Amino acid sequence: MWENFVTIWTAGTWWSDLLHITVYFLLAYLIHRLSGRIARRILRIGSLSRQRRQMRQERQNTLTSLVASAVTFLSVVTAVFLSLSLFISSADLIWMVGLFAAAFGLGARPLVSDYLTGVGFLFEDTFDVGEKVDILGNEGVVETVNLRTTTLRSPSGELFVVPNGEIRIVRNFSRGRFSPATISLKLNAEDLSRALPILEELSKEAPLLLPNLLEPWQIISETGSIGLQTELTLVAKAKYAMGAEMRPKLLALVHERLNEAGVHLAD
């Protein structure tokens, strides 16, 4: 059987060429199916060569997706070139590839830009799979990143498919250092002089009472005006993604401390 296959493979007839093309694209399809495993193996070898720091799981997932996409792309391109080489000489094929690349670069500039940006993601750590980002005004969690596109799942469930070449500014929520936990208080003007020392003293105690609070808050007046009543704003910083959870706790703490001192909030 093997001898028959070799005979057909080297026959030089049209059905021999068809067999070549079929084998090339079957191999490309097989590599595509195994691209995930190949990518993980490549990344594993790379991680063994540099033991300086452990790669984050999110970054590893992102690089796996990008490398798998690159492996698939290269396998398909190779299959196409090998198939063309059956009918075109090497010199003519090189000339045609150069001409095609120039025409393709001019006519499909956005597509080329998408792939080049995707290659850049292999070396940059802009965002990873699983992180919450804002790209082109579209907010969501990154689901996949490949050489051509990046997909985001929005909070309301829609799937955004963003061409990589369109990505210029990325707002990465998952890499923030803190979250704002700002609260506002409305006081009677006559209680302001008593409330300020209490709030200043409490701001020093608050990080100990509420561990997710990063530092003492700042007391400001956004309007800078006073009448029968005035409004104060406590600008506080909480650990990242803990801002919404901290606000009610801050309100309860401030309300309790002011009530103990006989200072009541204005209606």
Image (cartoon, rainbow, N blue to C red):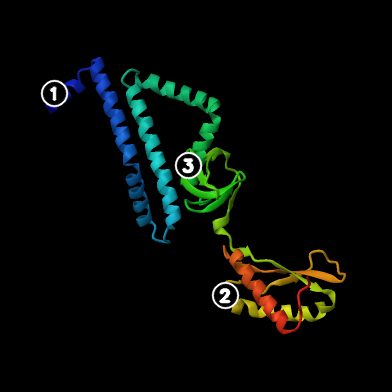
> Gap in Å between the C-alphas at discs 2 and 3?
42 Å
Residue 3 x/y as whole percent: 12, 25
Residue type at numbered disc 1: Asn
Instruction: Tell me the quarter of the picture where residue 217 sits.
Output: bottom right
Residue 211 x/y as whole percent: 57, 75
Q: Height in image: 10 above or below 252? A: above
Residue 5 x/y as whole percent: 16, 25
Side of 247 where 73 appears, left or right: left
Instruction: Tell me the quarter of the picture where residue 175 sits.
Output: bottom right
First reached walking from the N terminus: tag 2 or tag 3 = 3
Quarter of the image where the N terminus is located:
top left
> Can you identify the residue that label 2 sits on?
211
Residue type at numbered disc 2: Pro
SS of the residue under disc 1: helix
Q: Nearer the viewer, residue 39 or 222?
A: 222
Answer whether labels 1 and 3 touch (C-beta < 8 Å).
no
> Gap in Å between the C-alphas at discs 2 and 1?
76 Å
SS of the residue under disc 3: helix
First reached walking from the N terminus: tag 1 or tag 3 = 1
Q: Nearer the viewer, residue 199 or 170?
A: 199
Disc nearest the viewer among 2 and 3 = 2
Residue type at numbered disc 3: Val
Q: Height in image: 244 above or below 250? A: above
Q: Nearer the viewer, residue 136 or 31?
A: 136
Question: Which of the labelled discs sits on residue 4, or is there none?
Answer: 1
Quarter of the image where the C terminus is located:
bottom right
Residue at 59% in and 63% down: 177
Residue lying farthest to the bottom in this orientation: 261
Side of 200 where 44 appears, left or right: left
